[in-house]
Image (spheres, helix red, strand yellow):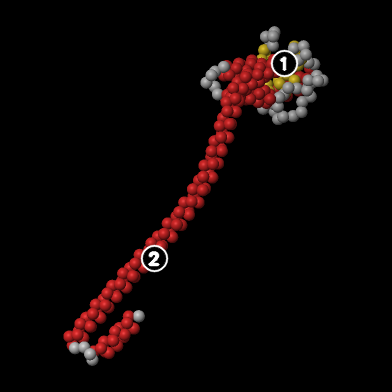
Amino acid sequence: MKNKFNIVQLCIIVSISGMLSSSDMESVLEVGRDNQMLSAKSQDRIDTTERQTDKIINEYKAVSKQVEGLKLYNEQKRIQIAAQLELMDKLDEQLVQVVVMQRQIPPLAQRMLESLESFISLDTPFRIEERQNRIDLVRSSLAKPKVTASEQVRQVLEAYNIEAEYGRKIDTYESTLEDGTVVNILVIGRIGMFYQTKDEQSSGRWNNTTGTWDELPGSYRKPIRDGIRMAKKLAPTDMLMMPVVKGEV
């Protein structure tokens, strides 16, 4: 473009050079040079403006992408906030229900404990002092205001679990009969409770109906002795032929 412009200028200068003096020619050339400089400056300004425009456009595109990303981020946050608000409403409802349940738990735990105590009083009286002490301990805990409702329920359920465990194991311990005789007590689940004197000469079975001990014949001396050894882990578990009253199993 510049070359063509120069050629045109040159042609014009050549065509009029015959009509102009040397001083006039110099003036014309000076004007041409000035025009070239102005044209070059104009082109520089155009190039600078174009670069600045491209920079602004690129910055605008980058900002537009950021704006779109922020719009998507804000939309996700609005969804999350709405879900959290809904969850807070549900938690408030559950909190109200929890408060109601907490008020109901202490009376429920008390009734459960009374039922367990009644069961123990009607059950075979093995380890009766130990079991009653456990009931008293739990009752004392229920009366303490600092004990939480969950802890109250836990203690009552633990007492129930211990009582249930008695029915699944064979146990033995030392006790004293009403006449002062020291004996070994054998408890086989809740199937039966038996005693045997230290010299193994006398054995008996607890009668739940009469609430007394029934003397057993000598044929049960060995089974009861073997059962006591099994409970003490002195002999492997084996079958025992024991007297069981019909309807108590």
Q: Quadrant of the N terminus?
A: bottom left
Which residue is at 66% across, 23% downward? 160
Residue 156: percent from left, percent from top: 62, 22
Q: Quadrant of residue 147?
A: top right
Residue 221's disc number:
none
Q: Position of residue 201 (x, y in %)?
A: 74, 15
Question: Viewed as shown, does residue 43 lie left or right of 166?
Answer: left
Residue 181, compared with residue 80, is above or below; it is: above
Crowd tier of the residue under label 1, counting other residues whose Cα lies within 10 Å: few below 14, some 14–19, many 20 or above:
few
- Where 42 sits versus 80, above or below? below
Taking depth in this image into account, of 247 and 110 the one nearest to the observer is 110
- Marks 2 and 1, how far apart in space? 97 Å
Is residue 27 or residue 33 the one in the foreground? Answer: 27
The local crowd at label 2, few if under 14, some if 14 to 19, many if 20 or more residues have their Cα within 10 Å, is few
Tag 2–tag 1 contact (CB < 8 Å): no
Res. 243 visible in picture: no
Q: Which residue in the protein does label 2 denote?
A: 54
Residue 141: x %, y % from top left? 57, 19
**Residue 95: percent from left, percent from top:** 56, 30
Q: Residue at x 26, y 77 (%)?
A: 35
Residue where numbered disc 1 is placed? 122
- Kindly identify the amino acid type of the residue bearing the numbered disc 2: Asp
Residue sitting at 22 percent across and 83 percent down? 28
**Residue kind at label 1, given as amino acid type:** Leu
Secondary structure, mark 1, is helix
